[in-house]
Structure formats: structure tokens, C-alpha cells
Image (cartoon, grey):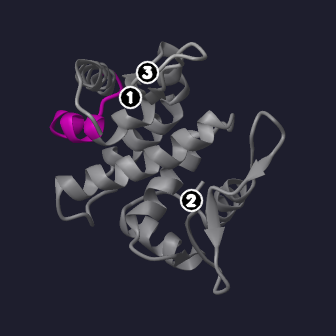
Amino acid sequence: MPASKDRDLAKLVLQEFLTSVAVPPDLHEGVSEACVDQFMTVEWPRPAPGTLAYLSPRYRWVIRSDDLKACDAFWKGLASAASVNFFMGSVSAAAIVGIIGAVFSVFYSARRKGAKLTPEQCEMLIFLKQCEEPVGEINIAKKMADQNREWTADRISTVLKSLEKVRAHDGTVMAVVARDSDDKWAVAAI
């Protein structure tokens, strides 16, 4: 992505927001870097008809207050996961930041389409993204128990099924997770 003062300012705004939602300070720089480009807009100049112009895109990073408030579910899910060492299987801060960035991308894509995800759904997305390959519900329950998470098999099943059919504000239904033929779950591309 092109560097600009707007992008740097957007990163600072995100870092300030991360402080307010109790994300550990050592992750602020990486998480803001991983998430900032979700707020980028590209504008192409529109010269008047019949004129010759150099058409170079203009990049802007726009973070509205309501964007951050709407993303509150994601940040609450993240904070909840981090509070009980949810990422203890990750070997480095870079791996954690990569997981957070990827899940935020899925979350924000769904949000732009008008879908609303709960903190619980965000926590499940973070968990699934942390797994390197698709995982079955039984293994999800075992891994959650290993991490001292209080998720029952019914709760896991309910959350996964709710992520399979997320309704956007225009009435369309999209899948945020996908189940393969072996009944294993993974984050779906939106």
C-alpha cells in the first residue's frame, strides 16, 4: 500500500482506540498495521469530458467513529480471547498479529455488507483462523477446554451454524465459515 500521512494518522487513531479496548500495548503497532488498510478508499479523478488528464488514484484512509463503535464486537471478542491466553499456541507476536489482521479483514468485509457479528462469533472466527487447517467440532471443544474456555458443545455448534448463515442488511445471506465434507470448519473468504 502507498505510504501517506493519512495512513499514518489512521494507524495512530487505531492505536489510540486499541488502548481504549484493552488490547495489550505490545500488539498496538502490529494490529494497527494489519487492520488499517481495511479503512482505505481509492478515488480516481474524473476529468471533464473532452479534456486530457493524468489519471492517478488517490488513496485515503477514513475511520469514522461509528466504524470503530460497530467494530466493538470484534475488539470485545479479541480482548476476551487475549484475557485467557487464547493465543498461547502461537509462537510469536507476529503470528498473533497475522491472525488478528486476517480475522479483522473477514469481520470488516461482513460489516461493509451490513452483517452484524457478536463478540462470541468474533471469538470463534479468531479461534478458527488460529487453526492451521479445518477443524471438527469435537477438536474445537478439546482445544477450547485446553485453553480453559467455557464453551459447551452446544454453544460451539450454535455459533458455527450462526456463522454459516449471516444475514446482511440487504437481506442476502453469506457464509463467514465453511464446513467441508468431513464436517470440519474453517473461515470462509467473503
In the rendered structure, which amino acid carries the disc numbered 2? Ala
| Residue in front for this viewpoint, 47 or 164 | 47
SS at badge 2: loop
User: What's the amino acid at mark 3?
Assistant: Ala
The correct choice, above or below, for 110 with respect to 134 in the image is above
Cβ atoms under marks 1 and 3 closer than 8 Å: no
Looking at the picture, how far across and down is residue 129, in whole percent? Answer: 43, 61
Mark 1 residue crowding within 10 angstroms, few (<14) / some (14–19) / many (20+): few
The x and y percentages for residue 27 are 21, 40
Tell me the number on the disc at residue 53: 3
Q: Quadrant of the N terminus?
A: top left
Q: Is residue 3 visible?
A: yes
Cα separation between marks 1 and 3:
9 Å
Mark 1 in CB contact with mark 2 (< 8 angstroms):
no
- Circle 3 SS class: loop
Q: Residue furthest bottom?
A: 182
Q: How busy is the neighbourhood of tag 3: few (under 14 within 10 Å), some, or many (20 plus)? A: few
Q: Is residue 115 above or below residue 95?
A: above
Q: Looking at numbered disc 1 in the image, what kind of residue is underneath it?
A: Ser
The residue lying at 46 percent from left, 74 percent from top is 142
